[in-house]
Structures are given as structure tokens and as C-alpha cells.
Amino acid sequence: MIKRAFVGKTFFLKMWENYPRTWKFFIDLGVMLKYKTLNTSKIPNKIVLPSSNAIFINSEENRGRALLISNGMTQKRLTSFWTKAVNDYSPDLVIDVGVNYGECIFSTNYPNHTKIYGIEANRDLLTYIHQSREVHPNKAQMKILNVFASDKEEEKTFYVDKHWSGTSSAAYRPAHEMIEQTKVSSVTIDSIIEENVMNKNILFKIDVEGYEAFVLRGMAELILKSGSALGFIEFNSEYMVKSGVDLNDFLRLLQQNFSIYIYYKNELVNGSQFSLSDLHKLFGSNYVHTDMILVKNIKKQIDIFQLASAS
């Protein structure tokens, strides 16, 4: 029952938003079943991933505890894609926007030539991210930045979700009261990447609770100059609308720059020509919560559908 609950992203987000105490009960139950205790001094703060790399987590925080229950695999779709993409695509530049505890960026090993950037706005997670970086084989190639990625440089109000770090956001304030409001500096990805990306391969992931459109606008120059790009983004129509995104405009932005592949029931659909109404028809709802793979000019013989398939 616990494992099944982690699979449905839409179910999970709705339940966590509306019934945080009930969901915390299930997480505590999962911890108790696995470790026979709720004493945080006896619960590990380190998870060894299938790659044998490790991530460190806050065992007192609910998302950290959920990662313990699932052995660091709460987003199997993303992790599977990321590992295959690094191996098959051999990127020159990697950008993970919305690192959280790092179960994506630290999930695999990278080629020696790859430069790796991790972007995380929630300062509460930095201690654990830096611990994980220090034990990663490619740590010398990694830069971790505590900034908020957007399309302009300014000061932003950021809502740190103390109940579930994964839903911390500048796009909206969660309905429950376990929130810390803080100020963060927003930057564009274009302004912080030091490498020359001309004719280089870029792999990126963006999961920022409704701010994906702004992040992509802030890396437009990087995408334009790159030889090729391969990206994985979350698409949550409700969060995007709350952040002020016009969904039709966002889809047009994607179509101008990428071929678009949409996850639907764990299968991949070519959505490069989809309108917003097409998305609504596909999912049978005006609320669309899924992931997308974005592809620009990939010359290598890479099967996108194979990248997206379950391991």
C-alpha cells in the first residue's frame, strides 16, 4: 500500500495538499514498518542508490523519510530516463534545476568531460546536497548553486514547505500552514553557466512546481547556441496557471524550440503538434499533470522511446 501510493503523482500531490496529517501518518507507518522505530536518532540519513552512489537526507523531514521508505526511488520514471540519457547521450553539460535531495543528479556517474550544475532554491536542503556531492565520483565536475532559476534577475518570495520539501515554491503558497516565507535571488540559467556550449550536447531536468516556463525562458540563449539538447520537465497545469503562465503560450514556446514527447500512462506520445485542447482530450481532463521529454537536434542514434521505457 505504501509503495503504491508513491506511484501516482497527481493523487499524491492532491492528498498532500489537502490532507497533510493523513499522509504523514502513512509515511510514519512506512518508516515504522521498515526500521521498527520512529526515533530519528536510529533512522539512517543516508541512502545507497541502485548505482551504488549515495544521497544524504533529513530523516526528520517527510520527503526525506519517503525517500528512505522507497530506497531513494520516488521518481522511477525520471531516474530511469536520466541514467539512460547520461549513458547514451554522453552530455557535455548537465543542468538539474530543482535538485531537492539530489536523487536525480547523484543517481548515476558521468563522463569525465561532463560539466554538471545543480540548482536548488531551498537553503534547508544544501547541507544534504553538499554531503552527497562530496561522496560522488564526479564531485570535481559539479557545481551546486543556491539560487532560484527564472527568466529575470530579481528578489522573489519563496515558500519553503516545512512539511514536504518537494513542494516548496515561488509559484504558490500551499494550503496548509507549515510554511516558511523567505526571500531568494532569482537568476537566469544563461547568466550562470560559464561553459561555451557552442555545438555542445546539453542534458537538463526542470522540476520547480509550476515555474518551468520561466526557467526555460531564462535558458533560451543556452538552448539556441547548443549543438543539441535533451530535457525532462514536469508539466503541472494547475501549478503553472497559479504562477501566471499562459499554457497555450508555453506550448508554443516548447514547439518553437523542441520536439515534444509526453508521458501518458507510462507510455510516450509524440506531442510536438499538440494544442492545449489536444492535451485535455488525451488526459480526459483540463487538469494535466505529467512529464515531458524535450528534444533539440539530437544527431546521435538515440531512441527516445527506449530512453523513456521502464528499466
Image (cartoon, grey):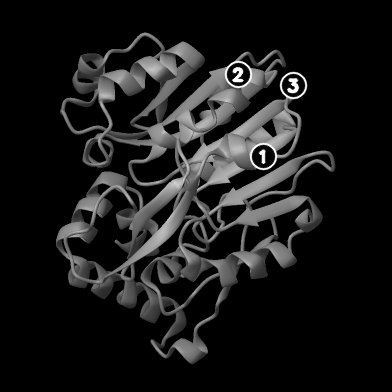
Looking at the image, residue 91 sits to the left or right of residue 175; the answer is right
Q: Pick whichever, 53 or 33, lies toward us.
A: 53
Please report the residue visible at 44 percent of the width from the left and 76 percent of the height from the top.
34
Q: Are marks 3 and 2 in contact (CB under 8 Å)?
A: no
Q: Secondary structure at mark 3?
A: loop
Q: Amino acid at mark 1?
A: Ile
Q: CA distance from mark 1 to mark 3?
A: 12 Å
Of pointers 3 and 2, the one earlier in the residue sequence: 3
Please report the residue visible at 43 percent of the width from the left and 47 percent of the height from the top.
154
Q: Mark 3: few, some, or many residues within 10 Å (few <14, many ≥20)?
A: few
Residue placed under numbered mark 3 in the picture: 198
Location of the C terminus (image quadrant): top right
Q: Is residue 81 visible?
A: no
Of pointers 2 and 1, the one earlier in the residue sequence: 1
**Residue 221 percent coordinates (x, y):** 59, 24
* Furthest-right residue in this view: 112
- In this rendering, is residue 50 above or below 87? below
Q: Secondary structure at mark 1?
A: loop
Residue placed under numbered mark 2 in the picture: 224
Q: Are marks 1 and 3 in contact (CB under 8 Å)?
A: no
Q: CA distance from mark 3 to mark 2?
A: 9 Å
Residue placed under numbered mark 1 in the picture: 193
Please report the residue visible at 49 percent of the width from the left and 58 percent of the height from the top.
100
Q: Amino acid at mark 3?
A: Met
Please report the residue visible at 25 percent of the width from the left and 32 percent of the height from the top.
288
- In this rendering, is residue 165 above or below 43? above
Q: Pick whichever, 13 or 265, lies toward us.
A: 13
